[in-house]
Image (spheres, grey):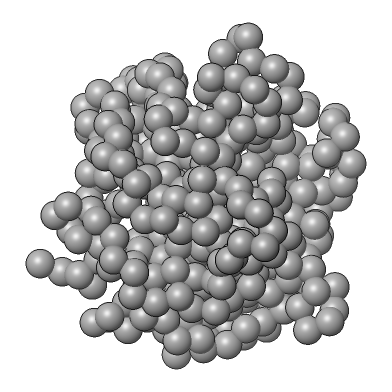
Amino acid sequence: MAKQFAYVGSYTRNAPGGWSYPPDAKQSEGIMVYEVDPKTGDFKHVQTAPSENPSFFALHPSQKYLYAVNEIDDYEGRTSGSIEAFAIDDATGKLTLLNRQPIGTIPAHLAVDPTGNYVAVANYMGGTFQLLPINEDGSLEPVSSTIQQHGSGLTKRQYEPRPHSVTFDPSGKYMVTTDLGTDQVQVFRIEGDQLVEVAGTKVAPGSGPRHVAFHPTRGLVYVLNEIGATISVFPFDAESGQLGAEIQTISTVPEDFPEKRSTAEIMVHPAGNILYSSNRKSAEHAVADAIVSFRIDSESGKLQLIGHTTEGIKMPRGFSLDPTAKWLYALNQKGDSIVRFEVNPESGALTSTGVVAETPVPVAIVFKTE
């Protein structure tokens, strides 16, 4: 049976949202590498690769390289974030740093295009989307294209652009982005080594779009709104890259939830019948920290709430299904742990199996299969 590895990112300093332990406690040193038992889903630590605030990852399509954004604003003494390229050892899963490039300030998200030729980045404080070419050896060239965002939104957090994510559609032809600051959802394509805008739309004012997830087989994109704690559903034309009129917006919290809200991650089950998102605690409420499950209607693509899973959950900034979709791993930024849930592929129900790894400030995870 093929080996499986998990790469877990963490905040090593200045953690947005704070820490769960005293300041003098041992903090994370970078990227935790785990070997994953494909039968039981258990984790075994094999390496910690030094890295500054590696807060999000993207795997190369070949699975030979891993890319991490460093969520910082002072790379080499300048007002800049950075991105790192690592080579992956197939046998052990261990990482070797290839190189590091400067990018915009406080990068929040990244994605590798399906051809494996480019990495795209969203820079939260820098107000930009950027593109970097990938060399044959997996290392990164300097930035080749920068898109500067403009505008503002309704709330105090939206006084300027806040690019938050970049996600390629299933065909790989287009990239959908979110700008939390301007409530924009935009579509780009890569021409040469440049990003070119194709289409765009807006979510409701003050929503703050954060991340998106595509339906695996249908032309639908689900937009997770952080400030509003909602999910907006849009038709997506894979041929033209155009977004259709919004067909639904549904809340991830109940009506009695306090005004201050926050969401983090979103993912569609490979079967296309279930969607998961996460609430991370912003106010006192029973489902302030939760993995939220929705059923996807087979005809309309609309969402229907299944329920909130809260057991063992504490500020789940990130979560992911493993490659088999048998397990869902939630990362507790303020619980310093990774907790595993068994997934019912038909009902979407999550059953806790307990803590799989004690990990300081885990915030991002990606899986590789040998």
Q: Position of residue 25 (x, y in %)?
A: 61, 62
**Does the image show residue 71?**
no
**Does the image show residue 185?**
yes
Q: Nearer the viewer, residue 56 or 244?
A: 56
Q: Position of residue 155 (x, y in %)?
A: 84, 31
Residue at x 22%, y 44% (from the top left corner): 326
Q: Is residue 73 left or right of residue 53?
A: right
Q: Is residue 61 left or right of residue 134?
A: left
Dividing the picture into quadrants, the one containing residue 175 is bottom right
Dividing the picture into quadrants, the one containing residue 330 is top left
Q: Nearer the viewer, residue 143 or 23?
A: 23
Q: Nearer the viewer, residue 45 or 365?
A: 45
Q: Is residue 110 left or right of residue 270?
A: right
Q: Nearer the viewer, residue 188 or 96?
A: 96
Residue at x 17%, y 52% (from the top left corner): 40
Residue at x 54%, y 19% (from the top left corner): 286
Quadrant of the snapshot with the C terminus: bottom left
Up/down of 310 relative to 63, above or below:
above
Q: Position of residue 59 (x, y in %)?
A: 43, 68
Q: Residue furthest left?
A: 1
Quadrant of the snapshot with the N terminus: bottom left
Residue at x 59%, y 65% (from the top left corner): 27
Q: Position of residue 70 (x, y in %)?
A: 64, 69
Count the marks: 0
Up/down of 81 relative to 155, above or below:
below
